[in-house]
């Protein structure tokens, strides 16, 4: 009997995906003792107690069944009210909001719903590792354009213009940025909006870190005008702002015809977001603001420590304005970013992520996350000082 070849059993769009550069280093770190991780992009805070309690009550009250495919109307109305209060953008909770399994599912649903085979999506890099992969899995083509440290890692709108072709369908943006901590100015956002209108493009805006900003204003992209709102899919969630990563609850907001497409895919692949997580998210919107502000204050304290420490070590770092990442230039070490991160982990047991993991714009940098205890950041900097005294 002829043996079945396993070489081609996977679809090319799957077998061709690059492994996550984030996971590579943390799989190694998991086998080591005494590692200080400045890598995983996850709040070290536990979900605030009133939100936890709401989830527990949900279970105790027998809320263990499916909800509407869209998500509970109470949650969708809460999301719509929240966005209108913060940014003045009005969404109809019944038809323009869907609750998803984190922003990850919202991203998958969006690209699957709007992309035809070969459609191009312009993606500024460095960026979160899932963006390009989700475009590819939906049959699209990611067109990566680098953002630069000299522009504080804001994309240059002229680079977007140059990347547009007859196959371009979407401009993707993600501010505040993972991995750089960049936050785009209103002027840059308005120019991107102008480009989208001129070329009749959709915009997908991942704003999962919208509340985690420091001495700066976050611009919600669909707030730039009704015509922009009507060509934008806004992605958001509860993982970062409310320390709810494990609850897996996010959302997408947008024009009714597009959200209808997301729901159609969602109902066949997921059915509904976890009911317990939806109930906890409803409570987060009601009572979570003081906890958000408390976490932002602490992240800001850690941010100042890490950025000052990295700069002192000769690892030039621009001041991140949002999220919880610093993005130091590691060229003073004389190594490329992969080698730098590998040696730092092996020699000093400090885990950071190579900037090249986040796309072409990240080469020569590393991502260091300050969503960890202040004392651990202090110790990580001490270890990095020893490392740089040998290699810097």
Image (cartoon, rainbow, N blue to C red):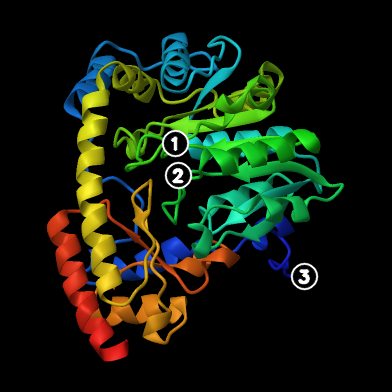
Residue mark closest to the camera, 3 vs 2: 2
Look at the picture and state if 191 lies above or below 254. Answer: below
Q: Which residue is mark 3?
A: 2
Rendered location of residue 226, percent (x, y): 65, 20
Number of numbered discs visible in the structure rendering: 3
Q: Residue at x 55, y 19 (%)?
A: 97
Q: Are marks 1 and 2 in contact (CB under 8 Å)?
A: yes
- Which element type, helix, strand or loop, lies under badge 2? loop
Q: Residue at x 46, y 46 (%)?
A: 183
Residue at label 1?
218
Q: Nearer the viewer, mark 3 or mark 1?
A: 1
> On the picture, is 200 further left or further right than 343?
right
Image vertical order of residue 216 relative to residue 367, above or below: above
Disc with the residue nearer the chain's start (3 vs 2): 3
For residue 93, side relative to residue 202 (left or right)? left
Return the x and y of residue 20 as percentages of the image width and height. Answer: 50, 61
Q: Which numbered disc flags the more N-terminal residue, 1 or 2?
A: 2
User: Residue extending furthest left?
Assistant: 375
Compared with 136, 211 (above or below) is above
**42 is higher (above) or lower (below) than 62:** below
State the image coordinates of residue 198 (x, y, percent, origin top left).
79, 36
Image location (x, y in percent) of residue 185: 51, 42
Q: Residue furthest right?
A: 166
Quadrant where the C terminus is found in the figure = bottom left
Q: Which residue is mark 2?
A: 176
Binning the other alpha carbons within 10 Å of mark 2 as few (below 14), some (14 to 19) or many (20 upward) gives many
Q: Residues within 10 Å of mark 1 (few under 14, many from 20)?
A: many
Specify the quadrant of the image occupied by residue 70.
Answer: top right
Seen at 49% across and 34% down, the residue is 219
SS for callout 3: loop
The answer to whether residue 112 is left or right of residue 82 is right
Query: Label 3 to label 2, Cα distance in Å?
Result: 54 Å
């Amino acid at each position: 009997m002829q043996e079945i070849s396993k070489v081609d059993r996977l679809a090319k769009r799957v077998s061709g995906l690059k492994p996550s550069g984030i996971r590579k280093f943390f799989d190694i770190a998991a086998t080591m003792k005494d590692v200080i991780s400045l890598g995983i992009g996850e709040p070290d805070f536990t979900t605030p107690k009133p939100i936890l309690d709401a989830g527990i009550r949900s279970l105790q009250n027998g809320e263990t069944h499916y909800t509407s495919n869209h998500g509970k109307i109470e949650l969708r109305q809460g999301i719509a009210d929240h966005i209108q209060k913060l940014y003045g953008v009005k969404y109809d909770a019944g038809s323009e909001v869907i609750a998803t399994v984190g922003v990850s599912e919202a991203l998958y649903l969006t690209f699957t719903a709007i992309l035809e085979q070969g459609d191009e999506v312009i993606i500024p890099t460095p960026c979160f590792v899932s963006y390009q992969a989700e475009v590819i899995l939906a049959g699209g083509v990611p067109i990566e354009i680098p953002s630069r440290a000299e522009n504080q890692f804001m994309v240059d709108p002229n680079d977007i213009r140059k990347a547009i072709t007859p196959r371009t369908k979407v401009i993707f943006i993600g501010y505040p940025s993972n991995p750089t901590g960049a936050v785009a100015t209103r002027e840059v956002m308005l120019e991107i909006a102008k480009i989208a209108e001129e070329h009749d493009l959709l915009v997908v805006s991942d704003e999962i870190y919208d509340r985690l900003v420091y001495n700066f204003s976050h611009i919600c992209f669909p707030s730039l005008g009704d015509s922009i709102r009507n060509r934008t899919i806004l992605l958001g969630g509860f993982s970062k702002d409310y320390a709810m990563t494990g609850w897996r609850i996010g959302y997408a907001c947008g024009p009714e015809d597009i959200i209808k497409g997301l729901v159609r895919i969602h109902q066949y692949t997921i059915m509904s977001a976890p009911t317990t997580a939806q109930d906890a998210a409803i409570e987060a919107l009601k009572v979570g603001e003081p906890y958000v502000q408390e976490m932002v204050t602490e992240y800001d304290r850690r941010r100042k420590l890490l950025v000052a420490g990295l700069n002192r070590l000769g690892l030039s770092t621009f001041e991140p304005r949002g999220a919880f990442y610093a993005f130091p230039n590691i060229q003073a070490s004389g190594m490329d970013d992969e080698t730098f991160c590998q040696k730092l982990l092996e020699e000093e047991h400090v885990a950071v992520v190579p900037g090249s993991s986040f796309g072409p714009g990240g080469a020569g940098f590393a991502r260091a996350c300050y969503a960890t205890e202040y004392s651990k950041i202090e110790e990580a900097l001490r270890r990095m000082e020893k490392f740089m005294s040998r290699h810097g």
